[in-house]
Amino acid sequence: MMLTLLHLDASARPGRSGAQPHGSHTRRLSARFVERWSSYRPTDRVLYRDVGAAPPSPVSGRWIHAAFTPEPKREAWMREVLAESDALIDELLAADVIVAGVPMYNFGVPAGFKAYIDNIVRVGRTFGFDRSRAGDPYWPLLAEAGKRLFVLSARGDHGYGAGQRIAHMNHVEPAIRTAFGYIGITEMHSLAVEYDEFADERLQASLEQADAEVDHLVDRLHAAGRPQPSPVAGQPNRGASVLL
């Protein structure tokens, strides 16, 4: 069965480290993931979105007005304001696997990726809201879609991992996990390059380790079986393989 892989890049740096001067480590890792995935599954469809080079429009007051207006009541300008968000969400809904290259900028995600999150976390499309609903008025709409998210990051310093010296300053993976989990994508795996600002043998070792981890991750996914495509949102994915 053909799967759809959504490849996202969020780095402001063009090119890939190791291939172009000052190239992006996260672009290097995300491309490596997709290339290795495609070597196993050459017929799968790959969608690509570069939110680093072409960031989505940030949410505005008009966007909020339009998003919280029931679809049948939306005016033409509202549909126009939401057109970009609709395109981003349609890509996400089509994807079985999401691979995101997301570097750390000042302890958080790049502005372009934050704008991406703001456009895909949307009432009525990826989460539900009903103020009259008993208990929690919010609920995820993609909880049973069987989607998997892989976040490949890079950091200037080191020690941002769980339990390490500056883990409390890492607002990349936690923010992504929270936002995607909110809409129902709860299976997330991540790895990161560190020591970028040191530019010494520790950076090189970290890059080599990250390259190897990407290869191992894709190899494990392939060895675990042939997963079935995600069902339509809201329908159980009864035939999917459990990976990792």
Image (cartoon, rainbow, N blue to C red):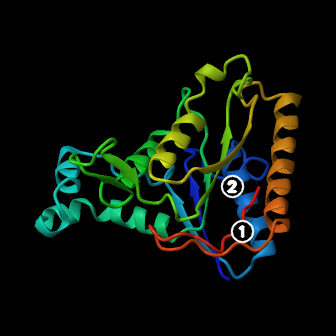
Q: Is residue 185 above or below residue 87?
A: above
Looking at the image, which residue is at 58% across and 63% down? 146
Q: Is residue 172 above or below residue 38?
A: above
Q: Position of residue 244 (x, y in %)?
A: 77, 55
Q: Which mark is residue 111?
A: none
Query: Where is mark 2, residue-wise?
Result: 30
First-in-chain label (1 vs 2): 2
Query: Where is mark 1, residue-wise?
Result: 241
Q: Amino acid at mark 2?
A: Ser
Q: Is residue 218 above or below residue 138?
A: below
Q: Position of residue 41 (x, y in %)?
A: 75, 76
**Could you say whether the residue bearing mark 1 is in a helix, strand or loop?**
loop
Q: Amino acid at mark 1?
A: Ser
Residue 24 appears in the rendering: no
Label tally: 2
Looking at the figure, which quarter contains the N terminus? bottom right
Residue 98 relative to residue 125: left or right: right
Q: Position of residue 177 (x, y in %)?
A: 55, 42
Looking at the image, which residue is at 80% across and 55% down? 217
Instruction: Please tell me how crowded label 2 is: few (under 14), some (14-19), or many (20+) other residues with Cα within 10 Å.
Output: many
Spatial distance from mark 1 to mark 2, Cα to Cα? Answer: 23 Å
